[in-house]
């Protein structure tokens, strides 16, 4: 490795060819968690608008009944599904499901937890969240 390879910054950290799909899942898990936290706070604020009466409630709901609001909600659906499915995959890995038998760590060491079963779980989480997002878009924009 040259010294320039260590200066890639965020672009290098997120490079899936360098670290594999596990790093992509790690980054998506963190981003979806932060996104869902932001949505949770915004949802609490939105729900508190009912204290302003029916007029205040309807006025605020008009913000969510736009094209941008529907796209935002579809992204929230995708984040929720990905975070849930990937979290279940991580929990199953922690208890040993799909990890495989322990092996002697000979060079070059490849962790047993990063096998094809867990990669299938990552791809499944991505595919399920995309399908859920498309379904949400179809419901919100459908006739």
Image: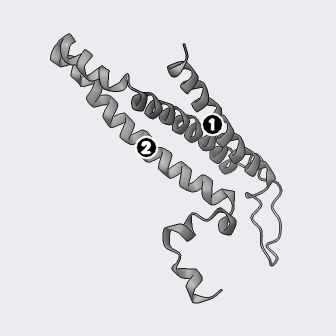
In this orientation, which residue lies closer to the viewer: 32 or 70? Answer: 70
Report crowding for label 1: few under 14, some 14 to 19, many 20 or more residues within 10 A (C-alpha). Answer: some
Q: Is residue 108 left or right of residue 11?
A: right
**Can you give x and y, in whole percent of width and height, for residue 118 in the image?**
74, 50
Disc 2 and disc 1: Cα gap in Å? Answer: 16 Å
Residue at x-position 71% and y-position 45%: 123
**Can you give x and y, in whole percent of width and height, for residue 68 in the image?**
41, 32
**Can you give x and y, in whole percent of width and height, for residue 50 in the image?**
23, 17
Looking at the rendered image, the quarter that the N terminus falls into is bottom right
Q: Is residue 30 left or right of residue 104?
A: left
Q: In this view, does 142 lie to the left or right of 47?
A: right
Instruction: Relative to 9, say whether 123 is above or below.
Output: above
Q: Mark 2 points at which residue?
A: 35
**Can you give x and y, in whole percent of width and height, for residue 43 in the image?**
34, 29
Looking at the rendered image, the quarter that the C terminus falls into is top right
Mark count = 2
Q: Name the residue under label 1.
A: 130
């Amino acid at each position: 490795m040259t010294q320039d390879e260590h200066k890639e910054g965020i672009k290098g950290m997120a490079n899936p060819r360098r670290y594999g799909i596990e790093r992509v899942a790690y980054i998506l898990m963190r981003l979806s968690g932060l996104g869902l936290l932001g949505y949770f706070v915004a949802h609490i604020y939105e729900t508190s608008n009912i204290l302003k009466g029916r007029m205040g409630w309807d006025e605020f709901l008009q913000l969510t009944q736009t094209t941008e609001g529907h796209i935002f909600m579809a992204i929230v659906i995708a984040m929720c599904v990905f975070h849930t499915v990937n979290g279940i995959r991580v929990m199953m890995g922690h208890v040993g499901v799909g990890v495989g038998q322990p092996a002697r760590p000979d060079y070059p060491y490849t962790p047993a937890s990063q096998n094809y079963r867990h990669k299938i779980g990552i791809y499944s989480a991505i595919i399920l969240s995309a399908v859920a997002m498309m379904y949400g878009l179809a419901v919100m924009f459908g006739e």
